Image (spheres, rainbow, N blue to C red):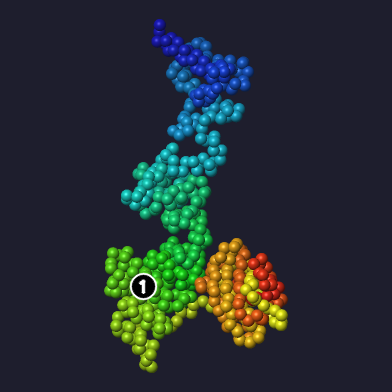
């Protein structure tokens, strides 16, 4: 038999087999023994709802008569070429076994017969992109992220990264594009890099306190401003005294002026807590010097000195040095002479700095002379006290009064709720005193939010018989967020009769801060918006 005829016969057999395979699913579906067709038959199936004529027509197209093949040969088209044009094109992905869209699979999709592919189970572009994040499927670049010994290999896709970051765009498609299939990034933490990739692939931002600073660094490095902004917002909302100094150092490094300003607000108002925190001991020397130059630190200088000593000991440990006097002075350098030692009281100096061994005998001698001698010696330490913060007072009553039958206490609670439109720090309360002359009161003050106690203090104050208000202080100023109601309470014990406020206001403008007041269910002694005790809130802003 001629070779051409053999090829035609072989081709005819292939077409008959293919026709049998295409018609087989209908036969199998009629059988009760077969519940579900194999994947290959679902991909290559004919539309079962088609008419018999349509099926015969499609089979005839796939299995043309012999003279048709002869005609193709006559005009120069080989049988092999004919087979190529009629082969079903099926492209299975390495994950999920997805098929490329062919006329047959498109027909299946149109008739709600879903091919078994991950693309179909994730209908939106965002979902499909998110699935490709940290996925080897179709990855064309790999990153080795993290320091040596703690690195992680991360697959990625150049196009997606380049669309989201100008740095990646230049890296992969610029004039100096990377040719390596693996790119090493030793200065970025793997967890932070994965958060960056998640955002670039899906616009999702998943931040955590432990990794937010590293994520901010990655966002800055690869110029992804939206992610960087989200990191800054996260840090602002989680900012408190114990981490304010660390965040100040980082905000300066990342050049984030808004975050820097927020850090200063916390450090100034809650200076004692900030300087005694572990975070203060972790800052760099330059940040330490900037803090020590700050005029508005709202604390005693002895607290500043103790914080500096703690920082020096921690720095010696970081450098592998013993905490000797010589080593502590060496790591501090000129920062030691930014502590305003002469502004301490004589007792504070004698019990603290004078016995710390950080000062030389000559320095100690000169400071004692500065306190006691008429002719004061020259000192290397600043002699002007810090200005600190001036407390502001929000007064909610327009007048005050007293009557013979009120205001009495007997252990009952006076309470009021308030909210502000800007973040402030509540330092204490102003209270009315006795209307019958000088008297001493014991008082327990408390600040709560949604039933949770934020601060309380048991203290005393002495009133002089006037209608003035007398301040009582919390141990430390407490940060109060905007647009949330807080409850302040006072339980007084002392002279039965005192002044009380009247003509109360529901809204008070105090400088740049607006206060709103409403009655509290905790109040059992008659205090409310219109009248009663707690005439003032003392705060820093």
Quadrant for the C terminus in the image: bottom right
Q: Is residue 182 above or below residue 24?
A: below
Front one among 61 and 343: 343
Q: Is residue 373 shown left or right of residue 521?
A: left
Q: Whole-percent x and y of residue 508?
A: 66, 72
Task: Identify the residue at image location x=49%, y=57%.
Answer: 231
Task: Identify the residue at image location x=28%, y=67%.
Answer: 321
Residue 153's image quarter? top left
- The residue indicated by pointer 1 is 309
Q: Is residue 351 shown left or right of residue 72?
A: left
Task: Identify the residue at image location x=32%, y=49%.
Answer: 149
Quadrant for the N terminus in the image: top left
Q: Whole-percent x and y of residue 127?
A: 53, 42
Residue extending farthest top: 1
Q: Is residue 276 visible?
A: yes
Q: Is residue 67 shown left or right of residue 395?
A: left
């Amino acid at each position: 038999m001629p070779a051409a005829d053999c090829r035609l016969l072989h081709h005819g057999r292939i077409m008959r087999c293919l026709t049998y395979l295409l018609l087989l699913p209908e036969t199998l579906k009629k059988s009760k023994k077969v519940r579900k067709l194999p994947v290959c038959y679902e991909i290559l199936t004919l539309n079962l709802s088609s008419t018999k004529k349509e099926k015969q027509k499609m089979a005839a197209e796939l299995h043309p008569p012999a003279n048709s093949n002869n005609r193709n040969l006559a005009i120069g088209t080989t049988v092999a070429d004919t087979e190529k044009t009629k082969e079903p094109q099926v492209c299975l992905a390495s994950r999920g076994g997805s098929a490329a869209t062919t006329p047959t699979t498109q027909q299946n999709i149109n008739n709600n017969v879903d091919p078994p592919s991950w693309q179909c189970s994730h209908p939106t572009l965002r979902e499909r992109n998110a699935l490709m994040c940290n996925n080897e499927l179709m990855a064309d670049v790999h990153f080795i992220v993290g320091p040596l010994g703690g690195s992680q290999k991360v697959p990625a896709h150049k196009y997606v990264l380049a669309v989201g970051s100008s740095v990646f765009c230049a890296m992969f498609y610029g004039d100096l594009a990377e040719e390596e299939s693996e790119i090493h990034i030793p200065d970025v933490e793997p967890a932070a890099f994965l958060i960056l990739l998640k955002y670039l692939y899906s616009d999702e931002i998943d931040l955590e306190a432990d990794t937010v600073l590293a994520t901010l660094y990655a966002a800055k490095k690869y110029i992804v401003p939206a992610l960087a902004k989200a990191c800054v917002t996260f840090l602002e909302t989680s900012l408190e005294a114990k981490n304010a100094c660390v965040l100040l150092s980082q905000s300066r490094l990342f050049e984030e002026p808004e975050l820097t300003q927020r850090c200063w607000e916390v450090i100034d108002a809650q200076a004692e807590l900030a300087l005694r925190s572990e975070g203060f001991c972790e800052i760099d020397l330059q940040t330490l010097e900037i803090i020590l130059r700050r005029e508005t630190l709202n604390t005693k200088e002895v607290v500043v000195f103790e914080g500096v000593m703690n920082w020096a000991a921690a720095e010696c440990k970081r450098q592998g040095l013993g905490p000797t006097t010589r080593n502590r002075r060496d790591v501090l350098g000129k920062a030691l002479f930014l502590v305003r030692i002469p502004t301490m009281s004589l007792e504070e100096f004698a019990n603290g700095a004078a016995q710390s061994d950080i000062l030389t005998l000559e320095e100690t001698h000169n400071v004692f002379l500065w306190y006691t001698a008429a002719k004061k010696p020259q000192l290397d330490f600043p002699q002007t006290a810090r200005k600190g913060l001036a407390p502001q007072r929000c007064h909610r009553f327009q007048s005050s009064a007293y009557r013979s039958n009120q205001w009495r206490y007997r252990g009952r609670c006076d309470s009021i709720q308030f909210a502000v439109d800007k973040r402030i720090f509540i330092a204490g309360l102003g209270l009315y005193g006795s209307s019958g002359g000088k008297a001493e009161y014991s008082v327990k003050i408390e600040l709560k939010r949604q039933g949770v106690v934020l601060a309380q203090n048991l203290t005393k104050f002495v009133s002089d018989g006037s209608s003035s208000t007398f301040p009582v202080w919390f141990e430390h100023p407490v940060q109060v967020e905007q647009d949330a109601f807080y409850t302040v309470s006072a339980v007084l014990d002392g002279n039965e009769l005192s002044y009380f406020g009247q003509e109360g206001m529901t809204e008070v403008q105090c400088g740049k801060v607006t206060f709103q007041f409403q009655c509290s269910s905790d109040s059992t002694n008659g205090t409310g918006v219109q009248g009663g005790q707690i005439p003032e809130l003392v705060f820093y802003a």
